[in-house]
Image: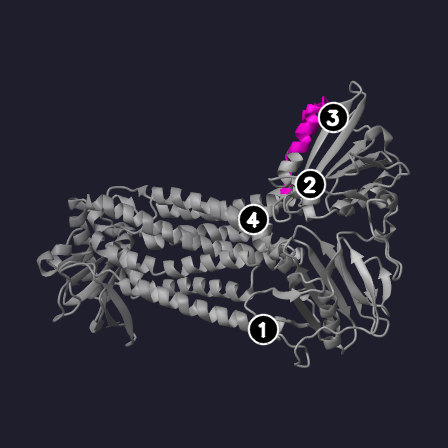
Amino acid sequence: MEEERTRKENIVAGVVGAFLGSLIGVVCTVVIGQLGYVAAISGLIMAVCALKGYELLGGTLSKKGVAVSAVLILAMTWFAHRLSWAVALAIALEQELTILESFRAIPYMLESGILESRPYWGDLVMLYLFTLLGAVPTIINGLKNTAMPEAPRTAGGPAQAPETEAVFCSARREWTRPLRFGASLSMVPGLVLGVIAIIAAAQMGAPISVSMAGLGCIVSSFVMIFCALPMMQANQAESYLYVRAAGTLWRVNLAMLNNMDTYRFANKLVTLTGMCWDSLSMEEQERARASVLRAVSLLNGGQVMPGSALSRAVLPLTDYQFERETDWGWRGTYALRNGRRKRITIPKCYPGFAPAPGLEPCQEPAPFQWRRIALGLVLAAALGAVGYIGGSALEGKLYGSPSGGKTASGNELTGQAPGSTLTYEINGVSCEIDSTFEMRSADTFQDPDTLTEYTLSVQTGMDEDAAVERLLQPISDYRMSSSFQGFSFAHADEEDTLVPLTAADGMVWQYEILTVRFTTGAAVHEAVALANDGVLVEVQVNQTKTDGEDEVKGTILYILESLRRTGSSQVEITGPAQVEITEENYQSLFHLGTEWGWSHTAVGYIRVPAEMFGYDAFVDAHVPYSDRPEYLEDGTVLRAAAHGMEVSVTITPSAGDARDVVEAAYEEMAASGLEIVAEGVTETFFLEEEDVAAKQAAYWEDGQSRARIAILYADCKQDGFYLSARITYFLEQLDDTYPELLAELCDAYAINLPEVEPMELS
């Protein structure tokens, strides 16, 4: 029963060792891959480190250990490969996606063709091949147990050194248990805290401070491994005998001695896993004693050359001098032939044994090393704190320090009203703009004196997380630039990221202004203001001159302070003249979207349900430009067709998400009697963070004489309300202009629409 429990404990310790070893392989895979070298070699490192980790903590590499380690190696190799690609993607996308988001998005990217599947899977195959290359020799050597000829009988040994004059001390396996588990568990706190910190950092967008804290915790685990290495000698204690004979203390390596033909005492050869004294039969133990005594006699008589294999297998601890005793072993030195002394630590795993006279022999196993676990926890916390402090300092150096609620000159930020203004209105929101500013496009104004450009936009269906993400986007965009100097927030000293702002109409918005500075003297400002119903006003400013930052931020604040909700939308703007969308004119405002740079796509307006905003309002809809647009269902649906493509747009209320809207549209289409082509129907694509969904369906019309492809699309515009579009390909009508229209529709709906050939399904 005790042996079975010991065996299970060895497996548990071995699994911990294999996991720690495989982490080294993961780190190598990611680091080598990002350095631009072939990361497949790290597969060999993964296999060797995992198997050696099992052997180090588990004592021996058993068949069960090989099976468990193999499963772990396969899983960690897959994880390391995908993590390496996720890191590369996050860097390539200039951190538009975090590492965690890239990790999750890889299957979709492969399926949709964004990532080429051949290099991805090819790298994984190469990684597994190198892993196999490292694993097979290690496993073969670790499990080698080759039958050998009958061991020869030793003669003359007892006569030269009678066995009665020698004392043999062998280790007991169960006495090593507290040492093994104390050493193993001391590495766990740093590993657990490090993994938690890295996961938290991934969720937070990988801030340097938290990432460095996690790295510090993981480093503490490796420090504890090195601290525990002397204690790890206890794992191999069963392979050593301590013999007191001929007035000297000898340490005998059983496996090494048995591998020498003239001293072999057992009918097996063990190389890496060692040889356990208790596993020998009584006859083998007797032959082993005789072999040891014969070797002692030869070595003691000077008949063996120094440095020979026998002198390493049966090591004389000449003139052993005890130095210090610990809870788990004795530390001392012994003399070498060159007059120097060498240190040696003897673990307390040998019942009734003491290495020197006057020392109390072992009566019980060494105590469990609780202090090591506590030390591992303290070290993890300390190195994690050091990493966090260092990361915070690095963030401050890279990103600058917050400026609190003050301007660059140290004054409190206040709005600066211009001498005269014009009213700018878009998507149900109006604000005041300096009338001297020149309009560069439908949403961009430029100060002619400083050439500073102000770009305004209004989005609906946003929440605080989305607003903060938009606010922080310039940091991701510019922090890797060589001219990046730092950044600051207008209200960094506030507890919340967004702070209250009372606008001109009395409505309270939540806002903040971010300033990113460059060594060239230029600056980029990003301001967001969020209403409680999800309307987000965004002001982006590019400042090219080396001064005037306070004035620019004052202008931004004035724009936000002048916000009013109007319930109407704004179309093409040319100077101060405004066109308000009303019940009487909204259908007549259908026009080619030249303000968006489009040549074949139109901008129209549709009526939205009154409960969407709480008042009568209209939203824009993007369809192919046609001289015969159709307004259906009392103006809530806009449909138009041109160049072989038709788009129908409406606002759909839904208690679910975008997927529910798309699935409901597909069910309605299928129930209408259309002949659906099953092979042409795809799974619903869904972006959870944006609440956007799309689904492709193919069908026949007129008795399989006309092929159609429909893209069903839904995008959240306001909580519970979705812009729903059906984009249909009339394959027999596609013309030479169709590719240009398709590209514009991809831009309008921010999705990749499939490009098909005329009559592709016919």
Number of residues whose C-alpha sits closer than 10 Å to that of mark 1, classed few (under 14), some (14–19) or many (20 or more): some
- Which of 178/750 is in front? 750
Question: What kind of residue is marked 3?
Answer: Tyr
Residue 605: quarter of image? top right
Q: Nearer the viewer, mark 2 or mark 3?
A: 2
Q: CA distance from mark 2 to mark 3?
A: 20 Å
Cα distance between the residues tagged 1 and 2:
41 Å
Which residue matches tag 1?
A: 396
Residues in magenta? 664-686
Furthest toward the left, the residue is: 164
Residue 710 percent coordinates (x, y): 74, 32
Q: Which residue is mark 3?
A: 699
Give yes or no for residue 678 being in the magenta stretch: yes
510 or 209, nearer to the observer? 510
Q: Which residue is mark 4?
A: 82
Task: Say which element carries label 4.
Answer: helix
Return the disc, 1 or 2, that comes first in the chain's sequence: 1
- Tell me whether the residue at label 4 lies in contact with that at label 1, contact meaning CB atoms closer than 8 angstroms: no
Say which amino acid is labelled 2. Ala
Can you give x and y, in whole percent of width and height, for residue 330 in the image? 22, 68
Q: Secondary structure at mark 1?
A: helix
Pick the quarter of the image with the N terminus: top left
The residue to which callout 2 is attached is 714
SS at mark 3 in the image: strand
